[in-house]
Amino acid sequence: MAAAGGFRTVEPLEYYRRFLKENCRPDGRELGEFRTTTVNIGSITTADGSALVKLGNTTVICGIKAEFAAPPVDSSNKGYIVPNVDLPPLCSPRFRPGPPGEEAQAASQFIADVIENSQLVMKEDLCIVDGKLAWVLYCDIICLDYDGNLLDACMCAFVAALRNVQLPAVTINEETGLAEVNLEEKTPLTMRKQPVATSFVLFDSLVIVDPTTEEEDLATGVLTIVTDEEGNLCSVYKPGGSTVTGAKLQDCISRARTRHAEVKKLMDKVIKSIKPS
């Protein structure tokens, strides 16, 4: 055991390749096998919507707060969705205190791009009074334990938290012109799509799903595919690294569609279980 541990430390890539030759990974998974995924919804009682997602050891929590804002000047009938991914030092030794690092910024932009491309929530649905008042949803996504595949976990927690959002009824007092909120009358946020992210890493000629931190560090490339429930592509994200052939890309898209069905089924089951009878 000690010798194996030493070899893994000195030659991590060669150690890993010995497992790949047997079509398995050091953690016992097959190359196309995902880690156990769990979803807990509504865990933050002070938020308007929240979700906690565990993907293996990777743990991410998302809390959403709804506030009032004036609509954009160029889009008087729209509201806002503002995602922010935080990678604090408590989740991994690789992160330091201070302003968001490159990986956190890239993850926030990834979520923002999916919002635009997937139309999971139409910003017109967040408008309260055209030209006067709209909802802004501040979506804070915090990683509590970092062990690879951050984007899949963040996307899952984000969508689950959105499905948990309840917005109160709002009217405008004609005499004062001020907004009046009825907390007794709340309605779920209207969601048009439910995108799911599926990430892969490239090892030589192999494509491996749901990578751990170690696998991401050793891989020659990373690929994340986002699909919706109709099988449409919402995003294909590949930040550099080795190229992917057309055939491998199609295989990854097929796997992503299968993964979408699994995640949506899990999320539907959790949400159904917390609804009052």
Image (cartoon, helix red, strand yellow):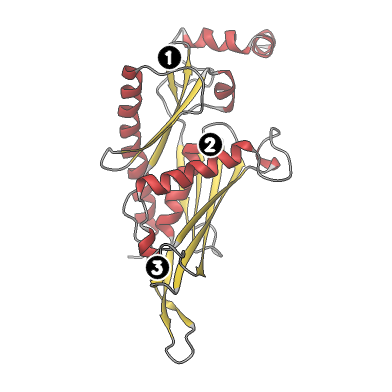
Residue situated in front as seen by the camera: 153 or 266 = 153
Name the amino acid type tagged 2: Leu
Element type where label 1 sits in the image: strand
Q: Nearer the viewer, mark 2 or mark 3?
A: 3
Q: Of callouts 2 and 3, which one flags the residue occurring earlier in the amino acid sequence?
A: 3
**Between marks 2 and 1, how big is the CA–CA gap?**
21 Å
Q: CA separation, marks 2 and 3?
A: 31 Å
Whether residue 30 appears in this view of the structure is no
Q: Residues within 10 Å of mark 3 (few under 14, many from 20)?
A: many
* Quadrant where the image shows the C terminus: bottom left
Image location (x, y in percent) of residue 34: 43, 29
Tell me if I can see residue 9 in this picture: yes
On residue 150, the disc is 2
Label ID, residue 206:
1
Q: Amino acid at mark 1?
A: Leu
**3 vs 1, front mark:** 3
Residue at (55, 22) in percent of width and height: 215
Nearer-the-camera pick, 261 or 221: 221
Secondary element under disc 2, as helix, strand or loop, is: helix
Question: What is the number of the mark on residue 127?
Answer: 3
State yes or no: discs 3 and 1 in contact (Cβ < 8 Å): no
The x, y position of residue 96, in whole percent, is 73, 39
Left or right placement of residue 74 versus residue 43 in this view: left
Q: Earlier in the sequence, mark 3 or mark 1?
A: 3
Q: Residue at x 68, y 14 (%)?
A: 9
Amino acid type shown at disc 3 = Cys
Residue 266 in the image: above or below residue 179: above
